[in-house]
Image (cartoon, rainbow, N blue to C red):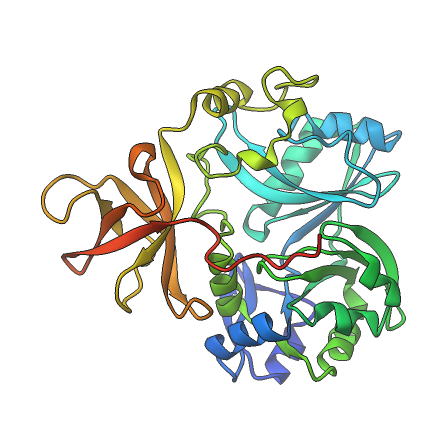
Amino acid sequence: MTELLRTPLYDLHVELGARMVPFAGYEMPVQYPAGIMAEHTHTRDKAGLFDVSHMGQAVLRGASYAASARAFEALVPMNVLDLGEGRQRYGLFLNDTGGILDDLMFANRGDHLFVVVNAACKTEDIARMTAALEPDVAVTALEDRALLALQGPRAEAVLTELAPEAAAMRFMDVRTMELDGVEAWVSRSGYTGEDGYEISVPADRAERLARALLAHDDVAPIGLGARDSLRLEAGLCLYGHDIDTETLPGEAGLAWAIQKVRRTGGDRAGGFPGAAQVLDQLDSGAARKRVGLRPEGRAPMREGVDLFAAQEGGAPVGRITSGGFGPTVGAPVAMGYLPADISAPGTTVYGEVRGKRLPATVTALPFVPANFKR
């Protein structure tokens, strides 16, 4: 068995009473003594602090930002070249048939690109970028940095006590600032649907900053359990569950992430892996679609539940990819894939739970409106 890795905040998690579990090769906190429901609610009402240091961080540096951006556009279907300095964008790595290899964030830091990728995929992602971009663009994996996420409606008030300039940031802005004596790379973004920040700091300074944030009355530590219920209510995809190598962006509801300049007829159309399949699906429409679902009653429909068009008879027409109880919604919520012709909000389908087909209503995403600062 492979020994689990630990983030720079491992000792702090144990001190705070976290229940640690294996996740993406790391020992990570799934919850603290308050419990998942309380942590979820605290993030929606105040501010939660998440350790996401297991994520991969990398710097891409060519002769100029433009050179790095042009090279990176050969790997992703996004407009990298025209991204403004100090701005961040959501991206996708795709395979040769348009399937999603990972989703990521990338930022224009003036003279380089800063990229954050998922923990379970980071080794492959770094290798992919290195093989495709070097030697013209140097790819540096940042093994000596931690990543914290401060999320919730009080996040701005908390962070501005340490750095007043954080208040002026808009959703997806990125800047360098000093936080409690630590130089930090801060983006106004997150994975909860709430306003908030993701903060990259040197690993040896992460605990100091985490303690400074946790000292605020509005901040509580939040584990993976509440992180998952928050992102599900926000309608956000979890890689390996809602999106994977068999999923194309159009059917996943991620067409918004592919800018016009990279689409059919755009000035830099195509030129990325799987472009023919991806652009064809965007032009002609996907045969299936990711949808939100509201199961009737109180019993959640979880990942793997088969979906049927009728209460009796017939083969499965889809499957749930994420599901659980939504604490803010106060009821079960789920996401999954259905044929396009039965994917409209208001449609009733049936999930098979313990041998019984139970009704669920197709619902527009997100379940809880986003509170990003535009």
Which residue sits furthest front?
346
Choose top left, top right, bottom left or bottom right for residue 47: bottom right
Residue at (47, 60) in percent of width and height: 233
Q: Position of residue 154 (x, y in %)?
A: 69, 72
Relative height, residue 139 to residue 98 (above, below):
below
Position of residue 15 in the picture relative to residue 167 (left or right): left
Q: Nearer the viewer, residue 196 or 98?
A: 196
Choose top left, top right, bottom left or bottom right for residue 338: top left
Residue at (61, 62) in percent of width and height: 194
Residue at (56, 62) in percent of width and height: 26
**Res. 271 visible in picture:** yes
Position of residue 263 in the picture relative to residue 89 (left or right): left
Q: Nearer the viewer, residue 366 or 211?
A: 366
Relative height, residue 270 to residue 151 (above, below):
above
Q: Position of residue 297 (x, y in %)?
A: 26, 66
Q: Nearer the viewer, residue 318 or 210?
A: 318
Q: How many marks?
A: 0
Relative height, residue 182 to residue 352 (above, below):
below
**Res. 222 visible in picture:** no
Q: Position of residue 196 (x, y in %)?
A: 69, 62
Q: Position of residue 210 (x, y in %)?
A: 73, 74
Position of residue 282 in the picture relative to residue 198 (left or right): left
Relative height, residue 159 to residue 23 (above, below):
below
Position of residue 194 in the picture relative to residue 177 (left or right): left
Which residue sits furthest left?
313
